[in-house]
Structures are given as C-alpha cells and as structure tokens.
Image (spheres, rainbow, N blue to C red):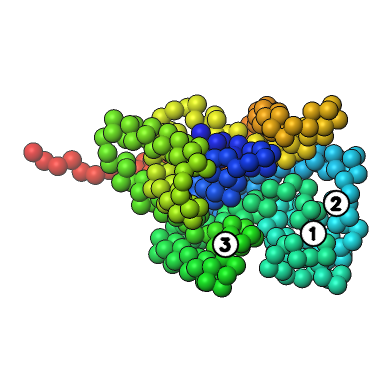
Amino acid sequence: MGLLRTFYALTVVLYHSWPTALFVGGQNAVQCFYIISGFLISYIIVEKRSYPSIRAFYLSRYMRLYPIYLFVAALSLSALLIARESSFIHVYQASPASAVALLMFSNLFLFGQDWLMFCGVQNHALVLVTNFNHSDVLLYQGQIIHPSWTLGIELSFYAIAPFVLPRRWLIIALLVGSLLLRAWFIHLGFGTRDPWSYRFFPTELALFLAGALAHQVLLPLYKRLEDSSRGALGDTATYLLLGFSALYFVIPLEEVYKKVFLLCIFVVLVPLTFLFQRRHRFDSWVGELSYPIYISHMLVLWVSSYVLKRLGMPDPQLISIVCVVLTIVFAMGLNRWIARPIEKLRHALRGRPAAASLLQLLRGARRAQTAAANAPACPTPLN
C-alpha cells in the first residue's frame, strides 16, 4: 500500500509537470487515494479502535495533515509574495470581503479548500457557480497550495467517519446514495466535467466508503487464507496494481471503461496491498513520503521552473525530472524533521486507550484483593 500511495503521489507530480499524460493521470490517482483513505480510516476506527474519543481521532488526523501543510504553505506564500505573483495578488485585490474571508479561512485551516471549486465572484459578490472558471475573479488562484483542495475533501471524510463507519448498513446506504447522485449528475450532462467529476464531496464519498467496505468485508476473507497464500496474493496484487497503473495511459481502451475497471479492481485488491505492507517494512517507509510529496510538489515545481528558465534551460521534460527528484528529497526532509516528531504525539493519543484499560484493570485487581481480605473465612469442606 505504501508503494502505491507514493506512486500515485508522484503521478500527480508528473500530471502537473510533464507535458504529456503518463500513468493513470492526476484525477484517477486522487480518486485511488480516496479509496485508500476509506480503507485505512475504517481499519483505525472499526478494527483497531485506536482512539479514546472522537475528539482524539479528529485531533490525530489534523496533526497528520496540518503541520506539514502549514510549513509548506508558509514557504509557498513567501515565494509568491517575494516574486510578486500577479495572479495570486489580484485575487485578493479584486475579490469582495466575503471571498477574501473564505480564502483566508481555508488557506489557514484547510477546511473549505474544496468549496472554492464551487464558488466564484460575479458583480463583486461571492456566489455559487457550476464551474470555477465562470467567475470574474478565479478564486482558486488565491489558494496558497493549489492541490490542497483534496485535503478539504479528506477532512469532510474524517468528519463523518466516526459516526458512519461503525454502522455497515449506513455505509451501504450512503454509498448507494452517492452513486445515484453521480449518475443523476451525469444524466444532467455535467457529472463528467470538472469540478463535478472528482472535486464534489457527496459524489466522491462513494470511493471512501468503498474503501471502508473493502476493509470490513474483503480483508477478513483474505485473512482466512493460509500465511503462504496471503503473502503470495499480497505481493501479486501490489505489483499488479503498480504495473496496471504504470501502463494505464497506453492501454487502447476508452477512458471510461479503463477508469471503471481501475477503481473496481483497486477496491478488490487494496486489502491485499495492506497485507503486503504489513509483511514488508520498506513499504511503510516509502508510503510515509506520499503526503509530503503531494503537498510540496507545486512549490518545488514553481521554484525549479523559475530557476531553470533563468539559467536558459526551459525544456519542460528537464523541469519535470528535476521537480520529481527535488520533491522526493524535500519530502524526505519534511518527513524527517516535521512528520516524525509529530507522529510521536499521535502515538501518544493512540496509546491512551491501552493505558486507560491497564489502569482500570489494576484498580479492579486492587479492589478485588481488598474485598478478599475483608471477607469472612469460608469453612473447609469435610472429606
């Protein structure tokens, strides 16, 4: 699973930097992330029951996303202001106060990043739009980190997860509702167009819930297999998905059929990739780089492009290669100096339930000993 997460993160980097389509493309990679997220959050909440309260779960997830985001956002904002990026500054100069407030709130707290894809400015007023380009001011250009709109959707997933994932009937009901809503949008003629194709939380919820069902239904089935069979299937599933994803763009089928097949086979095989991760420690290490790569690559791309063009090397492919290499190096630094120290705090949050349970056991044992000591002696039965 870690290999897949980082592969898809690099696919998004190439989607934004390489001049032609490669691998599964940015949209498919993001939607595969939604499935993985549903699987892992279901594992945390339903199987491991890692957190003593819903608040602890929310805090842990926010701690996973926010520190790295805040650091990269601060660097990105500094770069934008130093370079006097006209499109970014114009958004704040030309937008009404309500739009500026939404931008500032979402840039600072992550919540609402996805809402910007459905908002625009018309007649100097903040309004809802069906296409973010149908606006007098392109509000998304006021985002400090453009790909962070997916974090807004992830936070929406997390917000409902503790209430939905423990109830399988509710998962199924919402999954069916989400799929029907997408079908209705497609029938109306805009369901396959951006931003409705993969940025609208209610329709993307189906992917998150499909990942949760993969954990709750398919993973127990795979666990019943013998150890050797599980290992072989985990290896095969992981490398199969990697190979299919890498060759996706050259498969001579219509996009709609390839996409449906990719998402369906991903749901079926993602539990096996999880088993692969548990058997191979390197997979977890590689997977830790996926989020830092994803959140930092636009900053690295912007700086790389600026420097190489100033040096007289404007070749897009060279810029893309440099961007990929530097993004990986930068992600390793983010993981080493920011994510890992924060991870210790998150482990402390997850450790509270076990500590509390142990404390309760100790108190119960002491009460039992006290009661036994104070109880009247029982007569010895005669032989």
Tell me if I can see residue 5 in this picture: no
Residue, x 82% and y 70% (percent of image)?
122
Q: Earlier in the sequence, mark 2 or mark 1?
A: 2
Q: Residue furthest left?
A: 383
CA gap, disc 3 and disc 1: 21 Å
Q: Earlier in the sequence, mark 3 or mark 1?
A: 1
| Quadrant of residue 90 within the rendered picture | bottom right
Amino acid under disc 2? Ser
Amino acid under disc 3? Thr
Name the side, left or right, on which 120 lies relative to 81: left
Specify the label residue 138 is tagged with.
Answer: 1
Foreground pick, 64 / 247: 247
Residue hosting label 2: 87
Residue, x 18% and y 40% (percent of image)?
380
Q: Secondary structure at mark 3?
A: loop
Q: Position of residue 126 (x, y in %)?
A: 80, 69
Foreground pick, 312 / 199: 312
Specify the label residue 23 is tagged with.
Answer: none
Residue, x 55% and y 36% (percent of image)?
7
Name the side, left or right, on which 158 lies relative to 133: left
Instruction: Classify 10 Å Cα crowding around label 3: few (below 14), some (14-19), many (20 and above).
Output: some
Do tag 2 and tag 1 residues touch (Cβ < 8 Å)?
yes
Q: Position of residue 360 (x, y in %)?
A: 46, 44
Foreground pick, 138 / 253: 253
Q: Earlier in the sequence, mark 3 or mark 2?
A: 2
Amino acid under disc 1? Leu
Q: Position of residue 346 (x, y in %)?
A: 60, 40
Q: Secondary structure at mark 2?
A: helix
Q: Position of residue 252 (x, y in %)?
A: 46, 46
